[in-house]
Amino acid sequence: MSTSSEKFLPVSQPDLSGREGDYLLEAFRSGWISSIGSYINKFERAAADAFECEHAVCVSNGTVALHLALRALDITPGDEVVVPALTFVATAAVVIHAGATPVFVDCDPEIGTLCPEAFARAVGPRTKAVIPVHLYGHPVDMDPVLDIAKSAKIAVIEDAAEAHGARYKRRFVGSMGTVGAFSFYANKIVTTGEGGLLTTSDARLAERLRLLRDHAMDPNRKYWHTEPGFNYRMTNLQAAIGCAQFERLNELISKRQDIAEQYRSRLSHLHGMRVNPSKPWAQPVISLNRVLRVKHAIPSSGRCTPDKSTPGRSSTLFRTFHLT
Ligand SMILES: Cc1ncc(COP(=O)(O)O)c(C=O)c1O
């Protein structure tokens, strides 16, 4: 229980010190306060450019971004979707909302992201998709994940909610799979208050995402609905904040790197402590700071070591602390 004398430490505070207020007021005064308005297209273009994706489709939050991706890819009851055992609950919840079954697999003991070998073992005849999560801003080892998915003919839905601007071998997260999903919740690197985004290089998929986002209403024939869709739209007000945030993407990433550097300089000399470990192929960003207290040596192979005493659970070689 906290007392009034204890200082409240937020997970992360939004930085709205640029033109966020100006753009928001402009959108407000324009009267376009729902999901039509000039900032929507600008925001989608800014996101597509920043993450080097051909198409970006903004939605109301990161959870519905994942749900819309599953729906657009026709994931239905009876299907299985591979999900890392360590992630935010939404990654698995949306699979259940789609009527499919999440199949949990182990994660890398150092960086906490989906282990490609464990993914390969989990693929079966009912597997339709995998959701690699670029957790805490560190990218998943995507080459083996993409290879396995290609040979199994399954979709790759990158959960990049926490990894705006992170890169894997120079490629931006969200640009490598069938579709990428981002969150713009207030503790994320780029925020719109609530908000989400889907990215893809597949024009037909982008078109389908736009259709389903807006009640599956035929864009050329108002109030003509070919199937049940959703209202997963972002507002012009949210997009206005987001446009100002994207202007400052590099600054927002650097500010978090500076905080991470302070944790590294103050903690990494302690025995067994590792601050934000990363793989040589990764250009991560900092979403949350991770401090690992290594109890035993991490295997030099760097491979995942399933904890045999608790099947389905991640290795217990380390503990992760979230710090701001
Ligand atoms: C890994 C991950 N996936 C999905 C989400 C869901 O995003 P939102 O909170 O915008 O619905 C989050 C949000 O915290 C997340 O961290």
Image (cartoon, rainbow, N blue to C red):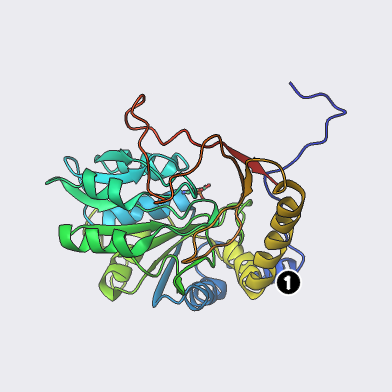
Question: How many numbered marks appear?
Answer: 1
Write down the residue under mark 1.
Answer: 19
Q: Quadrant of residue 18?
A: bottom right
Which amino acid lies under the numbered mark 1 shown in the image of this protein? Arg
For the view shown, which residue lies furthest in the top direction?
1
**For this rendering, which residue is in front, 312 or 243?**
312
Looking at the picture, does residue 319 appear above or below residue 184? above
**For this rendering, which residue is in front, 242 or 187?**
187
Residue 230, visible in the rendered structure = no
- The quarter of the image holding the N terminus is top right
The image shows residue 168 at horizontal and vertical percentages of 45, 67
The image shows residue 272 at horizontal and vertical percentages of 63, 41
Residue at x 47% of width, y 59% of height: 182
**Residue 224 relative to residue 273: left or right:** left
**Residue 278 relative to residue 315: left or right:** right
**For this rendering, which residue is in front, 124 or 76?**
124
Q: Quadrant of residue 56?
A: bottom left
The image shows residue 242 at horizontal and vertical percentages of 60, 66
Residue at x 41% of width, y 36% of height: 314
**Residue 236 relative to residue 315: left or right:** right
For the view shown, which residue lies furthest in the left direction?
125
Residue at x 26% of width, y 63% of height: 224
Residue 87, visible in the rendered structure = yes
Looking at the picture, does residue 78 appear above or below residue 149? above
Regarding mark 1 in the picture, which secondary structure is present there? loop
